[in-house]
């Protein structure tokens, strides 16, 4: 009977190969993946891609018109906006991905253990998650930021805390579904230890919905970090994080529109890519959508 | 004039990849008061035929290629949607296979029955609800339960509600698509018994689709055997059960376990039901037929009347 | 029915206490309130005195109990560092406007979103369907406050059709309410579309058609009644996110609501102002969640039955 369980798990691995093929066939998802790749590449290698430095001021050139020299114009200190957007992308995406990863690990542990061990522990954890979900994400992050202060590391923690609840929920319901399956009973009857069951059966099978949720949360988190910086928390100028670029640009909206327009386009494009990829993964892993 | 007359009906399911020939030249005649058992395996085209009569086919991908369906002399296939809606639920009703999902879960059952009454007959909501209560009693459910929701009923009772809805406007023709297949055997017996009584009460004509010959024996007086979208044999109940002519029909009976002959082995028909996308040439049953000859592969046999009212499509029946 | 409502209300109390606990923890972690309140008149003696007065030397559970009592009985949300006056005065004064804007935005987005979703589902695979789906996707990916700023540039600065900020005339409401409603309308459209597509293929729709009922009635009476349930769920989550975006949108369009108060408090480092605003917003979310859960009972008879029978909470908020 334990053999059946292992064979089922091997089938699950084959399932990933099938899902990968399905994903590759999804044109929109692939476009999203390629675009995101380009964006990440451009931001990471900003230093080599543009001739300007993101921090050095060039006052005579402030508010320059859009041209090939300055495809997004310049800001109030003459710094090239395109360069600052690319640099800002590093920061926004770093914060977002770190926060989501952190929340995913905590959420996975909380959700899996709550489902697995049950009892009072489960009730307390899930009630707590309910409470956290009652506080709107952005406001929660804002409130926590008031306690922690400014800076990239503080922002990561504040946002990560707000993302834990969704990921815990997903892990919790996936785990609940799986531990009720018969192959777990079979494994236990075969003498497998709790740790082995968690590692070999629960985690691989919960991976799929978690990955989908992580990708979708990535988009939401980018939005939150940008909103947070926009309202004056999170990351502040002169660090060129996308949200803080918009915050500064808002002050000049009447005389120079590029400062609010281009960072926003960058944010939107990145989030669209994350959503396309997330939808693509979800469709690829959905057994009902067999062509 | 017969109540229902189908002439050379051809229905296909056309997708971008393939064409499935679901119904191929089906013809049948139903007189008032008949109960026709439409028998065949899954995929034989029985449901498609019934859906064509009541015009509930999903029009892409389904397409009626040609043929006519005459109901009291009127060709249903040329009616527009508005005219057809006047017939559905009113003159022709259909009940489907799975009672668990056939009822709207958020509307009380009485209201669902009253809905069909109000759709076709002028009366107030209160009157319609009263008549819904009467229909419930007729199918063996207490009228007070009209305000309850489907989830509060068991499978068998849900199917009774479905029957109540179908019969509420006293239709002339009832299409029953495997109404008892999804039920437990004991519940099945109850529902069949109820349907036999109701049929007598309403003097209703029924097309009863099933793959279960036992059920056919209880309720039908005529039988049509369908295979790969064609009617391969039809006749009275007696004709089919006592003098089956087509090899497929004989095969169906041979596959049944029979109480008396416990010692003999079952003889299933060898092979599988053909894929409607890729039907065999000539007689569609020839790959599985123990008596097939070379001609059977060439051309489809014409229907041959073996005795009065008993027709078989097999060149070896002559 | 009554029992169901009471049960739901009771279940909300622990959640509410939990929210208070979180805000309390954040409040006590956000720096030295006493020093901020004293400001220039700081002396060590005054400092200790004030700490005693505010009960900050008591053990935390007692402080929390006092905090909860303060919120529940007097709606005490803290004292502003800047104005030295209760935060609740400012918040209560601004609350009606915030609610008005959020309500208008949600109402129009529900109507338009659901209708567009139904149309999209009925005409699946058509050009209209594809364009609506794409538009919905694009709009929900862009930060709504940014779209708001873009619209401000277009309609106020370039076209000069609408006022950029302020609510002097009814025209001033247009841009903020459209901006705030953009994400919800996209979500409602997508959700309605996918739910309707699922519902339309259900067997009971086929039964309804076989009764001779017309297309419109099938959609409204049968399909929509079932699709309403997940749509109402979405209303709950959208409440949550909309209130979050409301703060930012208010700041963009200079609307004197609770949201912009919160943001200006951030600017002046007036932490009680921020925390008080967050608390009020969370309370609104809790309240709407209860209302929506009660609405479920009316919409889905199975839920009401489950609730009354087992007393267990079924959660539809999983995505």
Image (cartoon, coloured by chain):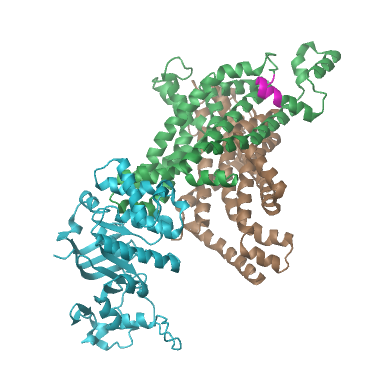
Q: Main secondary structure of the magenta part?
A: helix
**For the point 18% across and 63% down, which residue is it?**
B3
Q: Quadrant of the C terminus of chain A?
A: bottom left
The x and y percentages for residue A88 are: 60, 35
Does B67 appear above or below A238?
below
The residue closer to the viewer here, B27 or C120, is B27
The residue closer to the viewer here, C13 or C246, is C13
Does B155 appear above or below C284?
below
The x and y percentages for residue A81 are: 55, 31
Does C244 appear above or below C97?
below
Chain assigned brown: A
The residue closer to the viewer here, C253 or B128, is B128
Chain assigned cyan: B
**For the point 32% across and 66% down, which residue is it?**
B196
Q: Quadrant of residue C8?
A: top right
Q: Can residue B19 be seen?
A: no
Q: Can residue C26 be seen?
A: yes
- The shade of chain C is green
**For the point 70% across and 43% down, which residue is it?**
A124
The residue closer to the viewer here, A291 or A234, is A291
The x and y percentages for residue A116 are: 69, 54
Q: Is residue A34 left or right of residue A102?
A: left
Q: Is C81 within the magenta?
A: no
Does C100 appear above or below B38?
above
Report the span colored magenta. C68-78
């Amino acid at each position: 009977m334990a053999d059946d369980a292992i064979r089922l798990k091997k089938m699950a691995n084959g399932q990933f190969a099938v899902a990968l093929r399905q994903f590759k066939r999804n044109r929109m998802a692939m476009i999203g993946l390629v675009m995101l790749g380009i964006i990440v590449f451009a931001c990471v290698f900003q230093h080599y891609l543009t001739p300007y430095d993101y921090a050095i001021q060039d006052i005579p050139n402030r508010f320059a018109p859009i041209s090939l020299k300055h495809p997004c114009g310049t800001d109030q200190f003459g710094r090239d906006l395109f360069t600052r957007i690319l640099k800002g992308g590093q920061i926004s995406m770093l914060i977002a991905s770190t926060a989501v990863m952190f929340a995913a690990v905590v959420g996975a542990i909380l959700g899996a253990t709550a489902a697995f061990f049950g009892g009072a522990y489960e009730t307390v954890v899930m009630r707590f998650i309910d409470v956290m979900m009652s506080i709107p994400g952005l406001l929660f992050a804002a409130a926590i930021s008031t306690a922690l202060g400014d800076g990239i590391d503080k922002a990561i923690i504040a946002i990560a805390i707000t993302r834990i609840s969704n990921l815990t929920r997903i892990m919790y319901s996936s785990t609940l579904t799986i531990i009720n399956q018969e192959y777990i009973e079979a494994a236990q009857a075969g003498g497998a230890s709790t740790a082995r069951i968690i590692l070999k059966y629960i985690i691989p099978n919960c991976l799929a919905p978690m990955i989908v949720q992580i990708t979708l949360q990535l988009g939401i988190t980018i939005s939150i970090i940008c909103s947070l910086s926009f309202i004056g928390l999170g990351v502040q100028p002169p660090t060129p994080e996308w949200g803080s670029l918009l915050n500064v640009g808002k002050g000049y909206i009447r005389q120079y529109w590029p400062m609010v327009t281009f960072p926003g386009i960058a944010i939107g494009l990145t989030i669209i890519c994350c959503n396309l990829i997330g939808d693509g993964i979800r469709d690829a892993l959905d057994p009902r959508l067999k062509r | 004039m017969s109540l229902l007359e189908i002439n050379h009906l051809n229905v296909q399911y056309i997708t971008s990849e393939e064409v499935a020939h679901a119904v191929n030249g089906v013809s049948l005649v139903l007189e008032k008061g008949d109960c026709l058992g439409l028998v065949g395996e899954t995929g034989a085209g029985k449901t498609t035929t019934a859906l064509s009569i009541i015009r509930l086919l999903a029009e892409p991908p389904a397409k009626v290629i040609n043929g006519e369906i005459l109901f009291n002399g009127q060709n249903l296939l040329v009616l527009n949607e508005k005219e057809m809606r006047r017939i559905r639920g009113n003159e022709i009703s259909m009940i489907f296979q799975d009672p668990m999902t056939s009822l709207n879960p958020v509307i009380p059952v009485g209201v669902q029955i009253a809905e069909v009454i109000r759709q076709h007959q002028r009366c107030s909501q209160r009157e319609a609800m009263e008549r819904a209560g009467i229909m419930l009693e007729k199918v063996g459910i207490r009228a007070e339960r009209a305000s309850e929701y489907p989830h509060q009923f068991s499978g068998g009772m849900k199917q009774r509600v479905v029957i109540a809805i179908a019969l509420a406007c006293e239709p002339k023709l009832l299409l029953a698509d495997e109404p008892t297949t999804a039920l437990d055997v004991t519940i099945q017996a109850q529902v069949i018994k109820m349907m036999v009584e109701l049929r007598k009460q309403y003097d209703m004509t029924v097309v009863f689709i099933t793959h279960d010959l036992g059920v056919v024996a209880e309720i039908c007086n005529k039988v049509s055997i369908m295979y790969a979208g064609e009617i391969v044999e039809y006749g009275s109940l007696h004709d089919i059960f006592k003098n089956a002519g087509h090899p497929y029909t004989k095969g169906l009976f041979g596959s049944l376990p029979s109480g008396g002959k416990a010692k003999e082995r079952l003889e299933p028909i060898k092979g599988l039901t053909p894929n409607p996308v890729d039907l065999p040439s000539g007689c569609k049953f020839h790959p599985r037929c123990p008596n097939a000859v070379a001609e059977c592969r060439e051309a489809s046999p014409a229907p041959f009347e073996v005795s009065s009212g008993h027709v078989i499509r097999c060149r070896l029946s002559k | 029915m009554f029992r169901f409502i009471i049960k739901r209300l009771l279940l909300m109390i622990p959640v509410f206490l939990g929210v208070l606990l979180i805000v309390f923890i954040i409040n006590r972690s956000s720096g030295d309130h006493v020093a901020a309140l004293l400001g220039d008149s700081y002396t060590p003696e005054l400092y200790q005195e004030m700490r005693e007065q505010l009960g900050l030397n008591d053990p935390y559970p007692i402080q929390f109990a006092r905090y909860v009592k303060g919120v529940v009985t007097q709606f005490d949300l803290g004292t502003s560092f800047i104005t030295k006056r209760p935060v609740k005065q400012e918040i209560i004064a601004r609350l009606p406007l915030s609610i008005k804007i959020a309500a208008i935005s949600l109402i129009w987005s529900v109507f338009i979103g659901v209708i567009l979703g139904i149309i999209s589902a009925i005409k699946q695979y058509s050009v209209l369907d594809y364009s609506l789906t794409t538009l919905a996707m694009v709009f929900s990916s862009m930060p709504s406050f940014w779209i708001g700023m873009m619209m401000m540039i277009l309609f106020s600065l370039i076209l000069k059709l609408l006022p950029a900020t302020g609510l002097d005339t009814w025209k001033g409401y247009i841009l903020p309410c459209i901006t705030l409603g953009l994400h919800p309308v996209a979500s409602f459209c997508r959700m309605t579309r996918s739910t309707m597509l699922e519902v339309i293929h259900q067997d009971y729709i086929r039964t309804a058609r076989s009764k001779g009922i017309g297309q419109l009635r099938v959609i409204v009476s049968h399909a929509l009644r079932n699709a309403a349930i997940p749509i109402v769920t979405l209303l709950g989550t959208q409440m949550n996110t909309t209130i979050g975006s409301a703060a930012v949108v208010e700041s963009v369009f200079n609307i004197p609501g609770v949201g912009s108060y919160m943001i200006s408090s951030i600017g002046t480092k007036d932490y009680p102002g921020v925390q008080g605003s967050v608390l009020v917003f969370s309370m609104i979310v809790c309240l709407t969640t209860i209302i929506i859960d009660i609405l479920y009972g009316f919409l889905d008879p199975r839920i009401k039955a489950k609730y009354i029978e087992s007393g267990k909470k079924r959660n539809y908020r999983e995505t």
